[in-house]
């Protein structure tokens, strides 16, 4: 715990306003650890830095090299605290409490398993999210269901919080009292006698962080969900002498995650969703350019005044002096590589495809819309009809195939459209795949798969009633179809069989360079990769659904809701700004050019090598 010795009036009278930070946010020095999951928090001293994250991740940085430490449990670790590096505590999922003695990490509590080796339904496995302590070594950790544990120097003991609310922040105050806060605006204060009492906070928000800015004065940060806005709104609340005041109520803030002191800048930082970092000023939380759009979950103050910001997809940023050669890091794209094109339509575009042979690009969408790229302009082809079109592919005999609503497949011969196949039932086709030898596959709602070969069109047995959204394959004997609840089907040239990817998230897109290098994307930012042996699914913690994926020999690209776009550089996924808020529903990458299409006729172009 760090206390800033300033009064409330001094904090907000412009003391921190006017000057920009002495250093911009940038990647930390050294070889950055490769983590597709989340970093939640950390701890630092003059010797180095510890960071904790998903899957039992603990990294140590000695100023030059990041090293992954051996940890006895594979669960997410949410917070770190200690008086020195020879006695550190980490807390996390399944009630995990780990202790570092300067040499190794040891499990002290939590992560109990039953006779089958699965985590047991036991009070000791209640998830923990925050920890803080006092100079003498006494520490407190908090979590779900009002859980509060106290380290007495001998063992961890549960204390009666008097609430079942989920607690997400704990803070040891300079006068010996302890504050805990969490969901529903709950704020608890532990007296010197050891009793926890609830304070009457008028702001019903979900608190995630607390910082003592002067003796007895606490700044709280969090956020609450608003259904009408389909998102979170951040809150800053000041607690002074048992009185609560919501600060800057007119400021438009995303959900806030953490607070930290900038000792060398004499101020306070707040970090949150969508890469937001703000510096408190008299006028309000002043924006600070972070260079990332990833959610930031933790701020880690370091001796000497620097601060690290950590978050989704292994993001690690620093506002200290930049290294001589800053390595590439997830999410550091300050300017957009995507350029918006004039599609000439406001209809939603569900598909985009570039013919790898001719280089001609097409897009399709609502009301039978089909567009073709003609010398940097997009012009409409004759409409198919009133039906919505979802996917495009090359017709083996020449021309273009389109499929969509009502289970129909259409063929364009360069002059007009004709219905090539009509399944009759009102089942939407969502994906198409074809080769040059006369084979075509189509997939869609209710597990529908259609197969065309030299014998004509027929319905294939998929073995599922779940929707199938994406198709990809290197040849007509090796295809994948992806869909609801993590469904992956594999075609072996004869039949379709389930191929377990290890997730229950809806999968909307699939693409690969070969059978040992396949990507899938889906609901809530789900990202998966198959290396020929096993699937690896990244933690689904992104704000946006990812709806499509495509790529080149050197990079992969995924797009999704609210203008989300990401690229994979062979090492990790990088979030990219697109400059649009429209949902992006399709992407194609051929010949060094990436095209994305989506809502309101949105069309974007990106050079693959950018």
Image: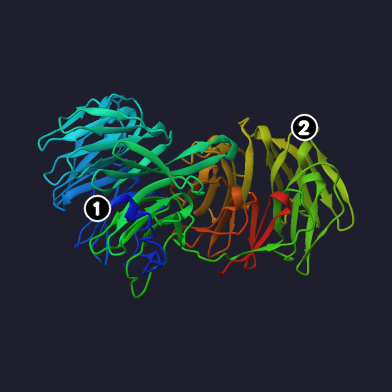
Cβ atoms at labels 2 and 1 below 8 Å apart: no
The residue labelled by disc 2 is: 426
Residue 101 drawn at (x, y percent): 13, 48
Res. 358 image quadrant: bottom right
Position of residue 450 in the picture relative to residue 268 (left or right): right
Which residue corresponds to the image point at 48% horizontal and 41% vertical from the top-left? Answer: 501
Secondary structure under the numbered disc 2 in the rendered image: loop
Secondary structure under the numbered disc 1 in the rendered image: loop
Image quarter (top left, top right, bottom left or bottom right) of the C terminus:
bottom right
> Crowding near pointer 2: few (<14 within 10 Å), some, many (20+)?
few
Which residue corresponds to the image point at 37% horizontal and 69% vertical from the top-left? Answer: 23
Position of residue 53 in the picture relative to residue 101 (left or right): right
Evaluate whether residue 454 shows in this view. Answer: no
The residue labelled by disc 1 is: 69
Name above or below for residue 363 compared with residue 455. below
Residue 532 drawn at (x, y percent): 47, 51
> Crowding near pointer 1: few (<14 within 10 Å), some, many (20+)?
some
């Amino acid at each position: 715990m760090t206390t800033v010795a300033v009064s409330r009036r001094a904090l907000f009278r412009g003391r921190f306003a006017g000057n920009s930070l002495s250093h911009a946010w940038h990647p930390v020095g050294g070889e950055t650890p490769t983590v597709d999951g989340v970093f939640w928090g950390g701890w630092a001293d003059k010797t180095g830095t510890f960071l904790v994250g998903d899957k039992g991740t603990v990294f140590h940085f000695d100023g030059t090299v990041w090293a992954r430490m051996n940890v006895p449990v594979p669960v997410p670790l949410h917070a770190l605290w200690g008086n020195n590096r020879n006695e550190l505590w980490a807390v996390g999922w399944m009630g995990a409490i780990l202790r570092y003695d300067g040499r190794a990490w040891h499990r002290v509590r939590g992560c109990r398993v039953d006779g089958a080796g699965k985590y047991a339904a036991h009070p000791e496995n209640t998830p923990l999210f925050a920890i803080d302590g006092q100079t003498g070594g006494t520490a407190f950790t908090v979590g779900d269901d009002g859980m509060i544990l106290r380290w007495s120097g001998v063992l961890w003991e549960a204390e009666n919080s008097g609430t079942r609310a989920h607690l997400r922040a704990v803070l040891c105050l300079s006068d010996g009292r302890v504050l805990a806060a969490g969901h529903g605006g709950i704020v608890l204060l532990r007296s010197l006698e050891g009793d926890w009492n609830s304070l009457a906070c008028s702001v019903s928000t979900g608190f995630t962080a607390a910082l003592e800015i002067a003796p007895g004065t606490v700044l709280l940060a969090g956020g609450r969900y608003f259904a009408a806005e389909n998102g979170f709104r951040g809150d800053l609340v000041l607690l002074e002498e048992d009185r609560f005041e919501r600060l800057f109520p007119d400021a438009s803030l995303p959900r806030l995650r953490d607070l930290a002191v900038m000792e060398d800048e004499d101020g306070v930082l707040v970090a949150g969703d969508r890469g937001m970092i703000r510096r408190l000023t008299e006028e309000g939380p002043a924006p600070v350019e972070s260079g990332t759009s990833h959610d930031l979950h933790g701020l880690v103050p370091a001796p000497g005044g620097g601060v690290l910001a950590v978050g989704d997809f292994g993001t690690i940023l620093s506002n200290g002096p930049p290294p001589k050669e800053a390595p590439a890091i997830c999410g550091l794209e300050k300017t957009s590589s995507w350029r918006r094109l004039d599609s000439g339509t406001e209809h939603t575009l569900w598909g985009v495809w570039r013919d790898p042979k001719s280089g001609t690009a097409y897009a399709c969408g609502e009301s039978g819309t089909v567009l073709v790229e003609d010398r940097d302009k997009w012009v409409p082809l004759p409409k198919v009809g009133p039906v919505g079109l979802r996917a495009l592919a090359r017709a083996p005999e020449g021309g273009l195939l389109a499929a969509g609503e009502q289970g129909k497949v259409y063929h364009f011969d360069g002059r007009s459209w004709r219905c090539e196949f009509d399944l009759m039932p009102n089942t939407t086709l969502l994906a198409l795949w074809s080769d040059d030898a006369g084979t075509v596959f189509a997939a869609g709602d209710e597990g529908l798969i259609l197969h065309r070969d030299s014998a004509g069109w027929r319905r294939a047995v998929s073995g599922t009633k779940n929707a199938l959204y994406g198709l990809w394959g290197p040849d007509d004997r090796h295809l994948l179809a992806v869909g609801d609840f993590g469904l992956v089907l594999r075609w072996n040239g004869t039949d379709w069989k389930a191929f377990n990817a290890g997730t229950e998230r809806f999968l909307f897109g699939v693409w690969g360079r070969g059978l040992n290098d396949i990507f899938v994307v889906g609901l809530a930012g789900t990202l998966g990769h198959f290396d020929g042996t096993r699937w690896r699914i990244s933690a689904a913690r992104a704000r946006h659904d990812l709806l499509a994926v495509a790529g080149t020999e050197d990079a992969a690209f995924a797009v999704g809701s609210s203008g989300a776009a990401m690229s994979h550089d062979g090492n990790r996924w990088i979030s990219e700004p697109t400059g649009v808020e429209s949902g992006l529903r399709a992407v194609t990458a051929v010949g060094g050019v990436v095209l994305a299409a989506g809502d309101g006729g949105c069309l974007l172009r990106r050079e693959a090598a950018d």
